[in-house]
Image (spheres, coloured by chain):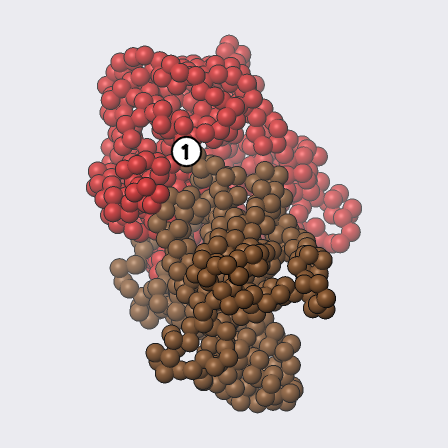
Amino acid sequence: MNDLAIELKGIDKKFGLVHANKAIDLRVRKGTIHGIIGENGAGKSTLMSILYGFYQADEGDIFVGGRKIEIKDPNAAITAGIGMVHQHFMLVENFTVLENVMLGAEDSQILNAGIAKARQELKRLEHEYELEVDPDAIIEELPVGLQQRVEILKALYRGAEILILDEPTGVLTPAEADHLFRILEQLKDQGKTILLITHKLREIMAVTDEVSVMRRGEMVATRTTAETSVEELAELMVGRRVLLHVEKGPASPGDVLLSVENLTVRDSRGVDMVKDVSFHVRAGEIVGIAGVAGNGQSELLQAVSGIRRAVRGKVWLDGAPVDVTGKDPSDLRHRGLAHVPEDRQHMGLVLKFDESENSILGYHDDPKYLNGLFLNIEAIRQDAAAKIEKYDIRPPNPRLKTANFSGGNQQKIVLAREMERDPKVLIIGQPTRGVDVGAIEFIHKRIIEMRDAGKAVLLVSVELDEIRSLSDRVLVMFDGRIVGERSPDTGEGELGLLMAGVEDGQEAAQ
Amino acid sequence: MSAPYAKLPGWVDYGLIPLINLAVAFLVAGLVVLAVGESPLRAASLMIEGAFGYGEGIGFTLYYATNFIFTGLAVAVAFHCGLFNIGGEGQAYVAGLGVALPCLWLDQVMPWYVIFPVAILGSALAGAAWALIPGWLQAKRGSHVVITTIMFNFIASSLMVYVLVDVLKPAGSMAPQTRTFAESGQLPRLDWLLSWVGLDIGGAPFNLSFLLALVMAVVVWVLIWRTKLGYEIRTMGHSPSAARYAGIGESRIIIITMMISGGLAGMMALNPIMGDQHSMQLDFVGGAGFVGIAVALMGRSHPVGIVPAAILFGMLYQGGAEISFEMPEISRDMITIIQGLVILFAGALENMFRPAITTFFATTGTARAGKTLPAGE
């Protein structure tokens, strides 16, 4: 009679003064795919960490299969039949698939007997759930999609009946994501229960049976997916109506302001990450670079902004050559290049600085912030206060430590700093990563405004939707090369194939 | 993911937690005293009495504190850049030359107020030069400063033995030290300062370099929090990748910071050489460079914390000397154990009581409500 796989009652968790989960109730029916959505910081990860035993709830009960249990650590969760596929894979990269799957479940100190048993069990699982992976392949040689499959196998090998997937599609191409969803359907048909945590509304609509929405540590609603809409879910997440579609007029491109020719960039391991890339960006247009994370976009951004040396190639900024082998981001800044880096927490901001200190990062040699060798604290704070007002940064306190701002507000600090310099060229990496839905709307509007003000905008994002809705031209990057240029109206399927490295005219290999 | 601990009120963070750590350190030290068969209470009262009970004791306490302010500031400046300069000992030792040489050259012809500025400059430059090499190696070659600076302590030690024995020792003398400076190579003592409050410093070598140390504490505060250079140093210290993004030259900042750090450590040499011994003696630094690490840790790398922490360690030095004099069971080495415990609890285990205290303040709600953060962020 009890068809609930998981029931949470009154789960409450505080971290010091932060109330991460407030009396959460959740009922997940057996054999369903249940989505959990919410903005960053809504408490989804905390809740799942409690369910998987990383944290203990301060209050509340957990029922698995109708039985009340204590989950003191991940081992207890595994014993209860809960498995987790982490956003960042927990795999030993230089081990084989088989070794990874049996890691921590070896059964005895002598490996040989265990290996044979594990191999057999793995075969069975692969067959049963159509999760083919070569058990002897080394993890680091596998594509990300297959690595994820290994994570799923790991959980199944430990007898998981309930699978938690934390933002599983962040690192996948659209095709790989579709494949993952087929696997999830398959698992569901076999009677497994799946908890899917994501912030992508489209995925929720595509695969889940039911969906629960979290906001500010509270569970605000649970809906049957078939009876709800993207608009309703977005509104529940943010707490107000959100404009999901980006309004923008046609572009009117002018002169070429940024031009890249035959650029090759090597990463710190000596591997060529950007291979012979050429493109240009005109004034008044947004050029988007689509691609799965790790295909050279980061290195490209770093080379163009002067942070990383290029091995070969040329870059022109506003018609003048840039020394690509030198590393001087401040020189490029003086020449009108503004850079919103992909990794705002480590690069774009110093989290321990207060807001006003971050609002001058990179521009701290501007005389208007200085009295000779001394900082003009008064001027810096006034300037920061003006930006806070204009960009609606909350809380509006230039002296608050930056780590205490939410992801969206942190991003606004960076955007305000870079956009208010009135640059000629703006390069932006992952403008809305880890940013709440409400702020996304604001950030997208600002980017379009920069374009309409005649700036050349180079946009890199792993969110294909974002690239398609903002860009005037889309370049697709795969394995360090630009493999194609498309109009933003191109179908997702075609762009997805390009992102997966499937050339024009060829059939999808998968 | 959520921040592990919420923010505590400033007075708890900078006042209560260090005090609790200190109290625990003394408690454990008391157990050690008990173990050797002496009364911890008597030891404690001897220490406090010896360090603060009378004019001369206070004079000595502040004399030692002067050394520790300089070396503590030196370590703190490097900390702000993410560098761990444990070579203060060697930098101060070599900087002795920057003090002693001007004194030896000029003490017959110039008054002290001319020699003093020259010696300040000399000590800072010599200390900076000794820190420049490890700094350069770190910046250009990636050799870790922890390794290089500690090696340079040994090199400095050997170098100074050579210089004192073979170069600076007056002919016919048996002691490895320079000749005693004439009066103009000696710094005025600050007996007038303590006589304002009715204390007589007696024979304590409490001298002008204490005031210089306080001035340097202010200078360091201005440098770190109010100058462009300080901004760059802190950016580098918190996040090297943000510094790269901001176009702050990594090698330049590392080298400059190490030189400032070495210069501050070097100025410590003024106190014993010009202020006390009036000659340069073998091993005059006496571990002050290492105590500076503890002082900087305990003072949270902030001048406002470093000055009291330096005075605390001055108290341990002076009061400890009194204890070992009064209680034969407790040797100088026992004092080192007590200092070690203070370093352990105040520095290394600084975060031991923090979670409990944070929880306490969160549940009692004493922490200011305005600091409450939105869920999860």
Could you say where residue B342 lies in the image, as x and y percent from the top left?
A: 54, 71
Q: Residue at x 57, y 72 (%)?
A: B339
Let me know if residue A248 appears in the view: no
At label 1, the amino acid type is Pro
> In the rendered image of this protein, does residue B14 appear above or below residue A187?
below
Between A172 and B239, which is closer to the camera in this rendering? B239
Q: What color is chain B drawn in?
A: brown
Could you say where residue B297 lies in the image, as x and y percent from the top left?
A: 50, 62
Could you say where residue A37 lies in the image, as x and y percent from the top left?
A: 37, 43
Determine whether the residue tagged by mark 1 lies in a helix, strand or loop: loop
Q: Residue at x 35, y 13 (%)?
A: A256
**Is B32 left or right of B197, judged from the image as shown?**
right
**Is A268 left or right of A317, judged from the image as shown?**
right
Q: Residue pushed farthest front? A: B109
Between A373 and B279, which is closer to the camera in this rendering? B279
**Chain corresponding to red in the figure:** A
Q: Residue at x 56, y 83 (%)?
A: B322
> In the rendered image of this protein, does residue A471 appear above or below residue A227?
above
